[in-house]
Image (tube, grey):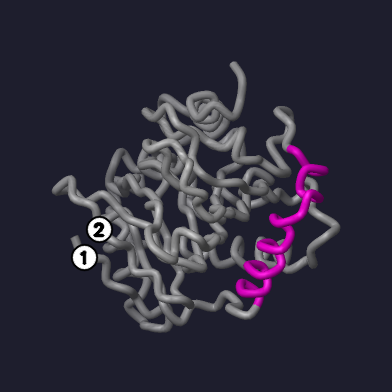
Amino acid sequence: MHITPVDYRDPEAPRKFSESLHDTGFGVLTNHPLSQARIETIYDEWLAFYKTEAKHKYAFTQEKMDGYFSPTVSETAKGHVKRDLKEFFHIYPNGRYPAEVSDAARLYYQEGSTLAAKLLQWVDDNTPPEIRARYSMPLSEMIANSDQTMLRVLHYPPLRGDEDKDAVRAAAHGDINLLTILPAATAAGLQVLGKDQQWYDVPCDFGMLIVNIGDMLDEASAGYYPSTTHRVLNPTGVAATQSRVSLPLFLHPRPDVKLSERYTADSYLTERLIELGVKKK
């Protein structure tokens, strides 16, 4: 499987991007409008934040699912028994936010959400009519005024060498939401599972924007846009002694949005959070 980067400025970008999503579950954009300087600021200041004890002041709550998730309560991917080797912070429009960092991540949330609506419109415009007819509303409208879209600032700590042999930074999984937009992380490691059941590296040159389909879009499109399994490998050598920071923005519809005859966005999200072990029944 080959994922070909698409130049955001190309007049044919909407079609090429949507075709890549349909064919591979991923789209990679170059020359996108998100501020690279802001992204680098977020990487630097949040890495410093994760090295302090201040992060524990913002421990997540079951009610809101915002704030800090330590490695001891990190996600366990569906079908796996070992927790991922990571810590992260969930940022929502009305959620908690660390006083120890600047407002760069909040500004990125707004900037990314604006771009996300445009990308969803690209997908909508390039969906075959018989598939588009299944959508309860245009895709971009599903996230309008949604307070469920979530920015996750992820930190994969350096490996100590005493990790469980079956534990990895991010076990093979699919995302829950409609689309995830992800600036290239501070280090490589992201892989996607191809239709041939082989693992492939996702292009991740610094400055690229990686976009992948989540399970909700798969559900809404009856599989036309497939939610593709992906993972983050444990590094080896010198890279194993270094942190990895990434910044996925998970585009979630409003809770009442109908995804299919089986699910609303709320019922789908609740089911998956329980499966991941981060929400109780």
Left or right of 268? Residue 25 is left
User: Which amino acid type corresponds to the residue marked 2 in the rendered image?
Assistant: Tyr
Q: Which of marks 2 and 1 is in front?
A: 2
Give the position of the N terminus as an image quadrant: bottom left
Predominant secondary structure in magenta?
helix
Which of 201 and 149 lies nearest the eye of the viewer?
201
| Residue found at x 44% / y 43% | 175
> Magenta stretch: residue 44 in it?
yes
> Magenta stretch: residue 281 in it?
no
Give the position of the C terminus as an image quadrant: top right
- Look at the numbered disc 1 and give the secondary structure of its residue: loop
Q: Is residue 97 above or below residue 42?
A: above
Please identify the residue farthest to the top as the structure is shown: 281
Magenta span of residues: 38-59
Residues at discs 2 and 1 in contact (Cβ within 8 Å): yes
Please identify the residue farthest to the left as the structure is shown: 196
Tell me the number on the disc at residue 116: none
| Residue found at x 77% / y 43% | 56
Q: Earlier in the sequence, mark 2 or mark 1?
A: 1
Tell me the number on the disc at residue 2: 1
User: Which amino acid type corresponds to the residue marked 1 in the rendered image?
Assistant: His
Which of 62 and 225 lies nearest the eye of the viewer?
62
Q: Is residue 68 above or below residue 17?
A: above
| Residue found at x 51% / y 44% | 85
Q: Is residue 30 above or below residue 174?
A: below
Question: Percent from the top left, x then y, of residue 156?
Answer: 54, 53
Q: How many labels does the image show?
A: 2
Question: Percent from the top left, x then y, of residue 127?
Answer: 32, 55
Question: Percent from the top left, x then y, of residue 206?
Answer: 46, 76
Give the labeled residue for mark 2. Answer: 200
Q: Distance between the residues labelled 2 and 1?
A: 8 Å
